[in-house]
Image: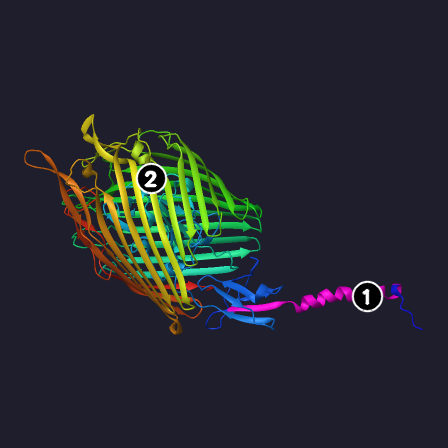
Amino acid sequence: MHRFDLNKHSSLLLLLMLAMPISVYAQSVWKGKVVDTNGAGVPHATIWLQDSKGEVADEQGNFTLTEPPKDGRIKISAVGFETIVANWPAGVTAATFPLVAATSDLETVVVTGSFEPQSARQSVYQVRAISSEVIQNRAPSTIQEVLNTELGIRFSQDNALGSSNLELLGMSGQNVKILIDGIPMVGRQGTSNEININQIDINRIDRVEIVEGPMSVVYGADALAGVINIITKSDASKTFDLKARIQEETVGNEYNPFDGKGTHIRSVTGSYSLKNWDFGASFSQNNFGGWKGEKTGRDYEWLPKDQNFLNLKAGWGNESLNLEYQLDFLDETVFAYGPDARLEVLDQEFITSRWMHRLSGRWDSHSNFGLTWQGAFTEYTRDTETWVSNVRTGEHYQSQAPGANTTLDYAGFSWRVIGDWKLSQKFKLQPGIDLNTETGSGERIVENEGIQDYAIFLSGEWSPFASVKIKPGLRKSWNSAYDAPALIPSLNTKFALNEYLDFRLAYANGFRAPSIRELYFNFFDASHSITGNPDLKAETSNSFNGSLDWKTQLNPEWKISTVLGAFYNDVKDRIAYGQDPNNIQVTTLFNVERYKTAGFTLNHTESFKNLSVNVGFSYIGRYNLLSEQQVIVPQMSWTPEVNTNLTYQFLPWKTTATLYYKWTGELPGYETVTDSDGNPSAREIMLDGYHWMDISLKKDIGKHLSVNAGARNILDVKQISSTSTGSDAHGTGTQRPVGYGRSYFLGLTYNLNK
């Protein structure tokens, strides 16, 4: 009889037991590939399982799962493509999943004001996002060309200084917080006392997020009207990348190839990743040759401008810690040529330089707690130089006349640390500290100790039910130069009324801080007698806004979205110019005015196959201060806006055609006039409305090259009329500049790893 010796065969049994899981594992690998409609692999697509675990596809779109999807269902998303939920084919271990190129922005991911990146639909804020695809299709030369057909946004030109001024939902740009990757910008300028957003390199912008309404709890001062967060490009997912862009554009009917008349853009960007490190560098030149318009001789309607941008960055990261440093440099010169003269010609140059050092990072100590920090140090200088040219001798030298050459220097430091604490699935806390300092000096700024602002803030997000989100917040600030508001509260709510309809309702208190210019700036020349007021306090506002957001998908190829929003802002202690009671010849600033805005917006978007259509309407009211003195003056003056964006993709030709249109209605207002006896009365004034239209074509050639062509300001708008009798050195009397006429552009973009 043969006996089975357990000891003798134990080694064989052990090997069999070890081999069984290896065999099972080898048979339990599911291989997939994500492709586009042409069968090409989609790189870095994200594959989500039902337990929220995810895998990322490689450069060719391949991915591997080590366990089967629960119920055989997976979710696949990728930038530039529609997200799908797919069933893994039964009985197979290899499958291919096609994605359709996105033609709408219905599933936009936003970061502004959020605990973490999330879809716009999940955010408690009503966020407008302008995607990278829209920016690429539009081929803009400035960020103004990206924003000028957005609802509720108006621009005005200060052609005396070569800058642009912004208005958001009836509030001036000095009430709008401008951020770069969440970090505030420094350098208010001009009579508008606001950031010039056209001093940002358009070639570095990936997307733009606009949050309407006060965001002062999270972002502090100057976020009274809202926040515009400009998010720059990041190519850390690619081992090596190289991009280059060249674009030529006429300025009205004026153009010289590659130099002088017209707009000339040249940009190159490179990035390199090695293990946990990534590095990047970019350089751009934007040269605007100016526009003569109706001017003769040496004068320009729109001043010539040269801009040079440099960006350097280095980052390091692992699963729990990420660090990034970036250096942004701007060099800008605006040329203001004086009129012809018999003996001496006077020209001015406005020279701006900005060095912005940014340090940001993220540390996730564990799954329930993380820290985010953002810091920046900015040195901003604006020089005004006056040059004299002797017509007879040809001599060219810098003027030594008093006040002919001035310098303004600003230095700003900001540091914020935010904690993300997930106490449970239903409740999150976000504590933070915010430190900001700014100093200013120059010939026209009186001696001062600058402004130091320190704040702590706390916000939370509570979801008592899956359909409800409640986000309260509080901020406490201390300021060295003015009386900061005692406590800044906010309350944002979101209710999912059903699968398709969301309702948002919010209250927020906001504030705008007086700037160094308003506190300490003195300006005296032949045309100006202006002094700052160091006793100013912050403007404050109480604001309410709400929205209904309806989204549905009738079939895989047809999506619909409609958003109806309404807002009301009541501003107190508004800073405004007035006569100095001690010297009526001098103008200074006071906290004397009250201001209100109200209105509603309606946006409707449909996406069907290769066509995307957006139609919007807004009706915005602005407060008439004279209504407090004249009963015949209505409290609010209202103006309408309509916009339309059409995008169609010719997939076989790899071509995208886009049309942008906006009608900006008449802007009414009131001003004080006096009769022959000196009695004051109110007179209605009107700023004309106008239509604006751009069209662009983008065609991909091969894998790496794309061509952009199109026309801006097709309707050839140049100036609009105003019935106001007021004018100054920065206006043109009854005419307001809007554009420099119809222009045409042609550009090439090369992307090594497209």
Label number found at residue 509: none
- Locate residue 497, reporting x and y percent: 41, 54
- Locate residue 753, reporting x and y percent: 48, 64
Is 753 above or below relative to 122?
Answer: below
| Label 2 vs 1, first from the N-terminus | 1
The Cα–Cα distance between marks 2 and 1, rounded to whole angstroms, is 77 Å
Is 572 above or below relative to 68?
Answer: above
Q: What stretch is highlighted in magenta?
A: 7-34
Q: Name the residue under label 1.
A: 13
**Residue 63 visible at all:** no
Label number found at residue 542: 2
Q: Of all residues shown, which one is farthest toward the right?
A: 1
Q: Residues within 10 Å of mark 1 (few under 14, many from 20)?
A: few
Is 54 above or below relative to 699?
Answer: above
Of helix, strand and loop, which mostly describes the magenta segment?
Answer: helix
Is 533 above or below relative to 111?
Answer: above
- Locate residue 104, reporting x and y percent: 39, 62
At 31% from the left and 28% from the top, the residue drawn is 535
